[in-house]
Amino acid sequence: MRTTLLIVVLLGIVAAGIGVLVLGAFPPAPHTAMVEKTLPLTRPAAPR
């Protein structure tokens, strides 16, 4: 059982390493989007 756990953990580390290498070699394209300007929220004055 300990050997199975070790194999699973090592496979996870190897998979994560491969993922990092693939993303390093082929980074995702940057997402460009228009910036939407919004007006600040205005609250009515609280009654005193």
Image (cartoon, grey):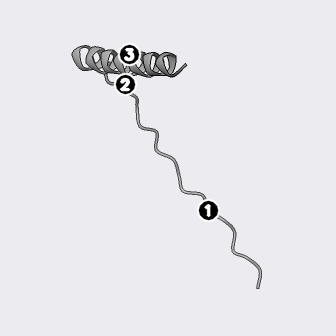
Residue that badge 1 annotates: 42
Image quarter (top left, top right, bottom left or bottom right) of the C terminus: bottom right
Residue that badge 3 annotates: 15
Q: Position of residue 2 (x, y in %)?
A: 50, 22
Question: Which residue is situated farthest in the right direction here?
Answer: 47
Locate residue 11 relative to residue 47 in the image: left or right: left
Task: Tell me the crowding category of disc 3: few under 14, some 14 to 19, or many 20 or more residues within 10 angstroms, Cα based.
Answer: few
Quick one: SS at disc 1? loop
Vertical position of residue 26 compared to residue 46: above or below = above
Vertical position of residue 46 compared to residue 30: above or below = below
- The residue type indicated by label 3 comes to Ala
Residue that badge 2 annotates: 31
Q: Position of residue 4 (x, y in %)?
A: 50, 16
Q: Which residue sits at x=50%, y=21%?
A: 5
Quick one: SS at disc 2? loop
- The residue type indicated by label 1 comes to Thr
- The residue type indicated by label 2 comes to His
Q: Nearer the viewer, residue 8 or 34?
A: 8
Tell me whether circle 1 and circle 2 mark residues in contact (CB < 8 Å). Answer: no
Q: Which residue sits at x=47%, y=18%?
A: 3
Q: CA distance from mark 1 to mark 3?
A: 50 Å
Q: CA distance from mark 3 to mark 2?
A: 26 Å
Q: Nearer the viewer, mark 1 or mark 2?
A: 2
Q: Nearer the viewer, mark 1 or mark 3?
A: 3
Mark 3 or mark 1, which is nearer the start of the sequence? 3
Question: Which residue is situated farthest in the bottom direction here?
Answer: 48
Mark 2 or mark 1, which is nearer the start of the sequence? 2
